[in-house]
Image: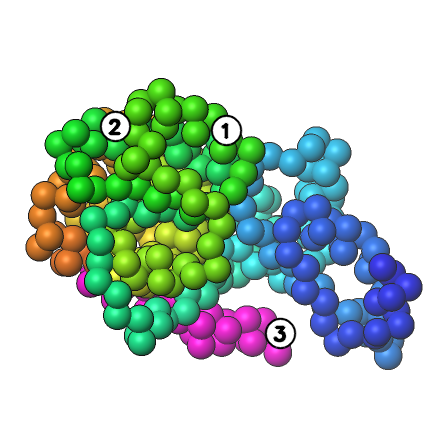
Amino acid sequence: MRKMIEKIAPGRIVSFVEVMNITTLLITKGLRKKGKKIPVIISERTDPFIFKIPAPMEFLRKFTYPWAHKIVVQRDNVKGYYTSKVQSLMVTISNAVPAFSSDITVLRKPVIISIGRLNIDKAYHVLIEAFSQLALQYPDWSVEVYGEGIERSNLEKLIGDLALEKQIKLPGRTQNVSEKLASSSIFAFPTRFEGFSNALAEAMAAGLPVVASDCDGNLALVVPEKNGLLVKQGSVDDMASSLKTLIDSQKKREFLGQAAQKSMLQFAPEKVMKKWDAILEA
């Protein structure tokens, strides 16, 4: 990598994610272009308070991060994990959330949708168990979770044990995210932790009312009762209660959906890219 970078002789280097950040800082140490140090900008994409990396890499992170020209984080609270010296290099830039395609005019169906990896961190068992409390009362409603992962067999077993195969589906991956969001009525997101959730942000940009866990990453997007509903992380009863609230009130769904869509304008691509441009040009 060092030989390739020397050959390319870039004006700037941008790296994403912890281990690659560390690697990039190590291999570019001392590299210069026309006698000047090549600026290296790194970006953290997870919450280091929750998402842990192996101890040797953690040591190297603390050792190498002060070498960076700038460090981009997605949320301000991440800064508290680092020393004051590293914090002085940090700039907060959230992910960009594209405007929802306005040419999609699909009638919303009584579907609770979620999109994400089928792993333990997404906590989809909470959504399944919560809906099991509502399924008999709302036979016309269903749940669709799009994505793949190692928890598929466990989730399928749970659905089978609850005899909800007709109302809860795991269709796998989809290339038509916008269409699926446009045709659904509620977005549910029981995740254990997030950095900045693209799935949640895109659902809100699509005008969907959301029920999300109160993990830090979701708190950055959802203001309770203003543009969505927050539930205690891991609470099946809270999730069931909030879903019932939205199922029972189309008016509330429309109000929260419209507010959610409006709140995502702050993450418009042109606004986010302007912040990146400022760093790259500095």
Question: Whole-percent x and y of residue 254?
Answer: 15, 58
Disc number placed over residue 280 in the picture, else none: 3
Q: Are marks 1 and 3 in contact (CB under 8 Å)?
A: no
**Upstream in sequence: badge 2 or badge 3:** 2
Question: Whole-percent x and y of residue 272?
Answer: 46, 70
Q: Is residue 265 magenta?
A: yes
- Label 1 sits on residue: 153
- Amino acid type shown at disc 1: Ser
Helix, strand or loop at mark 1: helix
Segment tinted magenta in the rendering = 258-282
Tell me: 122 left or right of 40: left
Tell me: 272 left or right of 189: right
Tell me: 261 left or right of 62: left
Of residues 53 and 231, the one nearer the viewer is 231
Q: Residue at x 45, y 66 (%)?
A: 96
Disc number placed over residue 132 in the picture, else none: 2
- Amino acid type shown at disc 2: Ser
